[in-house]
Amino acid sequence: METIIILIFVLGYLAIAIEHSLKIDKLIPALLMMATIWAIVSTTHMDVFEVNASLKELVPTDFQNILLHHLGKTAEILIFLMGAMAIVEIIDFFGGFGTIKKYIKTKNKRKLIWFFSLLAFSLSAIIDNLTTTIVLITIVQKIIKDRQLRLWFAGIVVIAANAGGAWSPIGDVTTTMLWIGNKVTAAALVQQVLLPSITCVAIPTFFASRLSAFNGEIEQEQEQESKEVGNNTSKYGPIMLYLGLGFIIFVPIFKTLTHLPPYVGMMLSLSIVAILAEIFSRRKFTLTTLGEDGNDQLTYHSPLHHSLGRIEMPSILFFLGILMAVAALESIGMLFHFAETLSNSIPLLGTESAGEKVSDLVIIVLGFASAVIDNVPLVAASMGMFSAGLDDPIWHFIAFSAGTGGSMLIIGSAAGVVAMGMEKIDFIWYLKKITWLAMLGFFSGSIVFILMRNLVLNS
């Protein structure tokens, strides 16, 4: 049965990786794979286990208990993401992201690429790399008419957004998974991964800014702006931007103070932002619609309802399928044994971590793998493979590697895929022009991380 389960997982994974060729949304094979694997485990009465991290061994457990355990852990991540997505959509409802454009004061290409790189790096640590990419490429489209130049900007934004999400517990799905799964704390993640992430974005931006594509100034846009980023424009846009981002940042603080799961803090933040949005929208967004009798009627359009309706449910269901499918492999002990085999077959490089012997090469390979396939199942698998304790350097390196490695190919991250769609970026163009920059940043950041880790462990 284990062979059949592995085959189902590999086929499902392959379908996810080539979704554009199959023209089938990746959530479909993810859900099918999850349901099929758990059904096989249940109907064939396979033994299921929990991993005892302290003893580094598998402990038999009850099927219903392990299923509910994994469902609960997965639900924590999904509810957290839905809350964050809702806050971002509320900000967008008021046109809050349009405020960012007002800070652009230069037309120098070299200064602009640094501006967008640093902005993407900072913003993705607060919201997420996907939303950051959408917002910034939309702004780039408004101020730059030359499409070839926009492609360069989009490539650097992808690298910066992925690097920015890697050091923040709320900046990327994978770091959120590690944080909620009690693999890392927010403070230690920032402390250990921030400098490597800065290196990962600074090196590519520096080399890109020296290219001929960024010589001179952008041409003055003649057409008059008619619309900001977002669905509406409002005088409350800047207020909602700062409030929304502020309350997202508040979530790690809330967890530290209360020791409650992060999704509780996110729900608190969402409720406060929603209250303010309802108050502001009564003053600004009361709409007039045509009633059934042909007369105008005043209706109230709730920004919360609007925002919840715009949450990307396909992404939520995809995460559900992937995380629960990987949880099934963990429950039957496959990931535990695979981790043992992997650790024993690849020689150690550098200083071993405090809790478990894992080669740096294994985690670097994980980064390269995330450029080809989705980093969410990779990190989910690693959480079941390794039994290292809280804030072990392994988890910090995995957060960096999986988060930034996806930049090496345009299909390697959610940020890259959305940039590809918005600017119709060709896979080969990205491979020739951007991949070497992303790879340079990845290796530079990895070296900085390893040096920092060894310095700490040897002190």
Image (cartoon, rainbow, N blue to C red):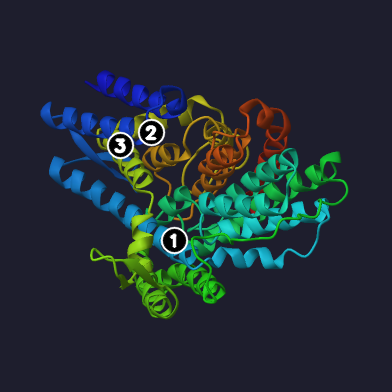
Q: Mark 2 is on which residue type?
A: Lys
Q: Is residue 79 left or right of residue 84?
A: left
Residue tagged 1:
89
- x%, y% of residue 260? 33, 68
Which residue occupies 53% across, 65% down?
A: 95
SS under mark 2? loop
Q: How far across and how far down the image is residue 330, in percent?
A: 30, 37
Amino acid at circle 1 = Glu
Question: Secondary structure beneath disc 3?
Answer: helix
Is residue 6 visible in this depiction of the protein?
A: yes
Q: Nearer the viewer, residue 224 or 458?
A: 224
Residues packed near mark 3 inside 10 Å, few (<14), some (14 to 19) or many (20 plus): many
Q: For the N terminus, give its image quadrant.
A: top left
Between 356 and 406, the one nearer to me in the picture: 406
Of circles 1 and 3, the one toward us is 1
Q: Earlier in the sequence, mark 1 or mark 3?
A: 1
User: At numbered mark 1, what does the secondary structure look like: helix, strand or loop?
Assistant: helix
Residue 26, numbered circle: 2
On the image, the x and y values in percent for residue 196 come to 66, 51
Confirm or deny contact between disc 3 and disc 2 (CB under 8 A).
Answer: no
Q: Which residue is mark 3?
A: 330
Residue 456 visible, this angle = no
